[in-house]
Image (cartoon, grey):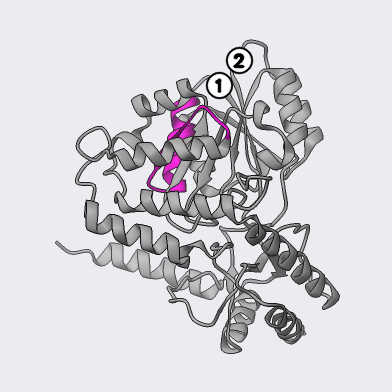
Amino acid sequence: MSHVALERRVRKAIHELESNGLRRTLKAPAGIDLSSNDYLGMATHPLVKQKMAEAVMNEGCGSTGSRLLRGNRESFTRVERQFAEFKDTEAALYFGSGYAANIGVLSTFIERNDLVFSDEHNHASIIDGIRLSRAKRTKFPHCDIDSVANHLRSAPAGVQKFLVTESLFSMDGDFAPLAEYADLCRETGTSLIVDEAHAVGVYGKRGSGYVEHTGTDDGVFLTVNTAGKALGVAGAFVAGPDWAIDFLIQRSRPFIFSTAPPPPVAAALEASMDVIRDDPERRLQLLAKSEMLRHLMRNAGLDIALSRSQIIPVILGDNHRATHAAEELQHEGFDVRALRPPTVPAGTARLRVTVNVALDESTLHRFATTLGRVCSTVCS
């Protein structure tokens, strides 16, 4: 079968991406990590690696089927119970990825005649999950409480409403006003769903996330908690009331029709949560280093938007400029990547700098100096 016409169309599209500075390439990690989501260093923690290796020898590599067939293991049940306790909810369910979890939650609970209100900066998995629900979506300006209040209070009576937001926004490094959202949702009978992907493991007294940090646990319907970022392993937990978790088991297509994750990841996640619980100093160090780097970057005259976290964007605007700056930093030994549309809005191409606990103060100072120089050169 000939694919000449299709190849021509695809090559044209790739050429257009190249011309606009939007063509992606795959690069292996190299240099000092200032781009990953392994904020607490759990991906290489000795105990986490040990427990995963032991589980491979005991349980093998693959689950051999979906959780509803032969793919379920006691280790999954155990780690879900541990995560629910960690999150202070009745139950939790483990998915193979954060993307699958968001798709599963939003397409399961939201129905065609419901109303959904979604932050304009929400992750692609949230957007796609809402699309699959076929409900009417209203996109509101980023973290705009007045807009949210107006939408929720003016919605028709008797209609099921959902408010969906990230707690810590992955591209901006700022936080949603969860306390205000929770109050509005209680007032208007709206179900609040919060994606804690970049907050779980880092914020709150237990480290369970920004929902805990803001004391809004009782105002949230469900949280989606990625396990491949601060927890250092893979997959995602959905946490909430037991009846909601049971309904996901019955109806969530990404859960029902996916082969279960490899069982050893459950053992690694158990170990990761143990470390986070027993070593709160690790989280405090991360927050202190993040604050230091934000201060250094502002002093260097860099535009880091409204970042208040371990995620620090450097807004450069132009796609080619962002790519060039990332390449220069990589040449200097710092692994920083450029983010361009559609990951971020047009005209806001940026470097996404992330802090991890393994970075020392001298490295942070050296990086800030180098970053300031590179950005000054690229923007001149």
Question: Which residue is depicted at the point 28% across and 64% down?
Answer: 5
Give percent across and percent down for residue 259.
26, 44
Mark 2 and mark 1 in contact? Answer it, CB < 8 Å: yes
Up/down of 99 relative to 159, above or below:
below
- Between 104 and 77, the one lying in front of the other is 77
Reading the image, the residue beneath label 1 is: 114
For badge 1, the amino acid type reads: Asp
Quadrant of the image occupied by residue 74: top left
Question: Which residue is depicted at the point 78% across and 33% down?
Answer: 180
Up/down of 201 relative to 351, above or below:
above
Reading the image, the residue beneath label 2 is: 159
Q: Which residues are magenta?
A: 88-109
Up/down of 70 relative to 51, above or below:
above
Quadrant of the image occupied by residue 73: top left
Q: CA distance from mark 2 to mark 1?
A: 6 Å
Question: Which residue is depicted at the point 81% across and 33% down?
Answer: 146
For badge 2, the amino acid type reads: Val
Counting residues from the start of the chain, the first of labels 2 and 1 encountered is 1
